[in-house]
Image (tube, rainbow, N blue to C red):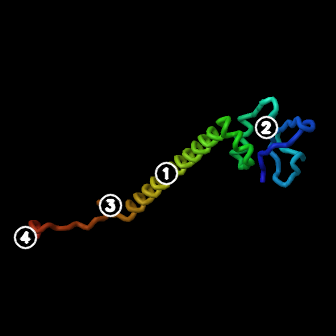
């Protein structure tokens, strides 16, 4: 599973963090897949690559609690939730279109079957009405 988490760098009592996407089984400061931002808590600096973070979240990456709090503070989590809802809504629309197309295809096929089963005017036997029967 891919996690979005912090890796620690910097000197003693002067931490510097990288926000990275990494496999959950790797070490805290081990190899990572992508660098998504940086955090310097002593200086109060935070740099985030929104597009990359949202891309990884859409692919199924799970943020740690600390990263989730940062994302919520920056408004990235709300933006991700909107894109996720929009994607679901788009999926529903597509599936609804597919359902209506299938229904239309079924109706066309049924109409074709009905036309084949119903006899044409030439094939229909002549039915005499009561008036014609009494005149004969």
Horizontal and vertical percent position of residue 136:
9, 70
Q: Where on the picture, by quarter, is residue 21?
A: top right
Q: Secondary structure at mark 1?
A: helix
Tags 2 and 1 touching, CB below 8 Å: no
Tags 1 and 3 touching, CB below 8 Å: no
Instruction: Name the residue nearer the viewer: 25 or 101.
Output: 25
Question: Which label number is shown at residue 134?
Answer: 4
Residue at 71% across, 47% down: 59
Q: Secondary structure at mark 4?
A: helix
Tags 2 and 3 touching, CB below 8 Å: no
Residue at 90% across, 36% down: 10
Residue at 16% across, 67% down: 128
Q: Earlier in the sequence, mark 2 or mark 1?
A: 2
Q: Secondary structure at mark 3?
A: loop
Q: CA distance from mark 2 to mark 4?
A: 96 Å
Image quarter (top left, top right, bottom left or bottom right) of the N terminus: bottom right
Q: Is residue 80 left or right of residue 114?
A: right
Instruction: Name the residue nearer the viewer: 129 or 89.
Output: 89
Farthest right residue? 11
Horizontal and vertical percent position of residue 90:
56, 44
Q: Earlier in the sequence, mark 3 or mark 4?
A: 3
Residue under pointer 1: 101
Residue under pointer 3: 120
Looking at the image, is 67 positioned above or below residue 105? above
Give the mark toward the camera: 2 or 3: 2
Q: CA distance from mark 2 to mark 3?
A: 72 Å
Q: CA distance from mark 1 to mark 3?
A: 30 Å
């Amino acid at each position: 599973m891919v996690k979005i988490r912090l890796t620690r760098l910097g000197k003693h009592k002067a931490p510097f963090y990288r926000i990275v996407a990494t496999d959950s089984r790797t070490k805290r400061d081990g190899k990572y897949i992508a660098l998504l931002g940086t955090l310097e808590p002593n200086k109060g600096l935070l740099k985030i690559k929104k597009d990359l973070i949202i891309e990884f979240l859409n692919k199924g990456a799970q943020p740690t609690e600390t990263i989730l709090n940062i994302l919520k503070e920056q408004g990235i989590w709300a933006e991700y939730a909107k894109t996720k809802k929009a994607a679901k809504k788009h999926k529903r629309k597509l599936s609804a279109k597919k359902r209506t197309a299938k229904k239309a295809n079924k109706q066309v096929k049924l109409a074709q079957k009905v036309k084949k089963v119903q006899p044409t005017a030439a094939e229909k036997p002549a039915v005499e009405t009561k008036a014609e029967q009494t005149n004969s």
